[in-house]
Image (cartoon, helix red, strand yellow):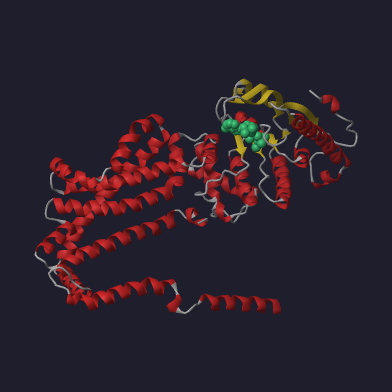
Amino acid sequence: MTKAQKTSVTNHTGPAPAGEPRIRVRGLGKHFGSLEVFRNINFDVGEREVVAIVGPSGCGKTTLLRCIDGLLPHDAGEIRVGEQLVIEPIAGVAMVFQHFGLFPWKTVFDNIAYGLRMAGASQADIERKVPGFVKMVGLDGFEKAYPYQMSGGMQQRCGLARALAVEPNVLLMDEPFAAVDAQTREILQFELLRIWQERPTAMIFVTHSIEEAVLLGHRVIVLKGKPSSIHQIVDIDLAEPRTRDALRQPRFAELREQVWSTLLREAREAEFHLERS
Amino acid sequence: MSVIENVNAGVAKRKEKKAAPFWESAAAYRYGFVALILIVWEITGPFINPIFFSYPSKIAVAFVKLSASGELPYYLGQSLEVMFYGMVFAIIVGIPMAVAMARVRKLDWALDLPINALYATPMVALVPLLVLWFGIYLKAKIIVVFLFAVFPVLINTYQGVRECDKSLLEVARSYRSSERWIWRDVLLPFALPYIAAGIRLAIGRGLVGMVIAEFYTTISGLGFMITRYANVFEMDKTFVPVFVLMILGISLTTGLKWLEARIAPWSHANR
Ligand SMILES: Nc1ncnc2c1ncn2[C@@H]1O[C@H](COP(=O)(O)OP(=O)(O)O)[C@@H](O)[C@H]1O
Ligand SMILES: [Mg+2]
């Protein structure tokens, strides 16, 4: 892999210790009929590591996450979470959806309790645990509200709390903040950082925002090509724990440019391709 | 200060605008027109041969008489019993069957044709047969109402479940929901507005079935009242059960709408 790209870390405390690999993706490939979405995807995610995935829309980011969550069968390679081979959704892995995926007929409380209920938690357990997660995402006072009564940002707070409530050791985030406005998005990014620091897990964070990828990820995977494959993995050696200050560090700008230029090159090539054909 | 005053003034203005004169409101037209019909009927009615026709005040008097004598409540009770059981069976058979069909493809393939064929058949044509098979008592009448009512429930529920949001089904799978919980947490709540629409249709059809069954079978219910008084040309008394049926239909469907808004507030939020 492209560890060679790592630059000096003298000014920084360096990336968080990632721990043992929690997710192992090996030689992963996926077709939809005759459409090959991606091929030969290899990467690991440590048990306390955030891996961000960026790539142009349509390159298969959602498909990759759905495979890792066990929602879709893959047709080459393997995925392991811990020692377990993923062939169907497994316990300890929770996904946050771009479209929020809240049940319109459930209140905030019941939406957050959903995962726990499915995992067989007792009513007493739920009453005891859920309020903490409501608070963690800042939804106290809205327990009885329905999703249609809330803004997109609040809905995604609810979606996040639902995932956190099952106390997963793997969090899969599919462009979770793409559908909320820019300000809310920034607030949610820093809240996610805070929450992750409170309870670090293995996390895959899919986004099409390079800033977001660099801010949240310890490594950024750039997907490229048709079918897509991993073009580059960039180590993000920002100071830990990350705060708002990260945005102002020159290193942040450098890393953002590095990821950006990779994607840009690809965008240019794609355009060039179109012109020729 | 002045800002607040302006706001208040604005609110006041809007309120003023809202309070249009009563005679221009929807309610005025809605009830005014009904009143007009009743008045015209009341005035012209007495000039028509009373063997074939009646008019509102005479019907009202008959209504009071039939209620006081206990005759109307007695027959109404019989009809309601038939309607109630027929509808309950239509709902408890129709909904699970529809969800099962929508979820199990082989069941769908097998049942699709017969169900649509039966739905398209004018059920009235089957009533004499049903009487032959099931007799003329309560059971036969409940079966008739059931057959009139079950198909709208079934077909609407089926459609609701089929149109269920795929992304929510994926959420349920991601959280490792069992099929049983998917029914409860995702499919049925999603289909609820469809189910309610189906039940509303079923009430209308069920009432038709109920009256027809009462025409054909034992001496019971509002249907029997109608035939009995029509046969002896007591038109005022004939109209009483007709009106009661009308009011029954209206109140059952409105009650259902109210219930739906109460138990499914989300489904009305974006309408
Ligand atoms: N269920 C599916 N059936 C067929 N094609 C699909 C399906 N889901 C996604 N695709 C296709 O796979 C490609 C990747 O989609 P997706 O993973 O959603 O991309 P991204 O999330 O990166 O925008 C797209 O070309 C999309 O049209
Ligand atoms: Mg996507």
Placement of B193 over or under A3, stated as above or below = below
- Relative to A98, residue B7 above or below: below
Name the foreground residue: B12 vs A105: B12
Percent coordinates x, y for residue A105 in the rendering: 49, 49
The image shows residue A34 at horizontal and vertical percentages of 60, 24
Q: Quadrant of ligand 2?
A: top right
Is residue A142 shown above or below A85?
below
- What residue appears at the point 31 percent right and 41 percent down from the top-left corner? B93
Above or below: residue B46 compared with residue A131: below
Asked if one can make out residue B1 in the rendered structure from this viewpoint, the answer is no
B172 vs B157, left or right, is right
Q: Nearer the viewer, residue B5 or B111?
A: B111
Quadrant, the N terminus of chain B: bottom right
Determine which quarter of the picture holds residue A168: top right
* Residue A130 image point, x, y percent: 57, 46
Residue at 59% from the left image edge and 78% from the top image edge:
B13
Residue at figure coordinates x 58%, y 38% from the top left: A166
Residue A243 seen in the current view: yes
Examine the image and state in which quarter residue B36 appears. bottom left
On the picture, is B142 further left or further right than A211? left
**Nearer to the camera, B155 or A69:** B155
Tell me which corner region of the image, top left, top right, bottom left or bottom right, holds residue A196. top right
Observer-nearest residue: B235 or A124?
B235
Is B218 situated left or right of B187 in this image? Answer: left
Total of numbered circles in the picture?
Answer: 0
**Drawn side of residue A222 relative to residue B210, left or right:** right
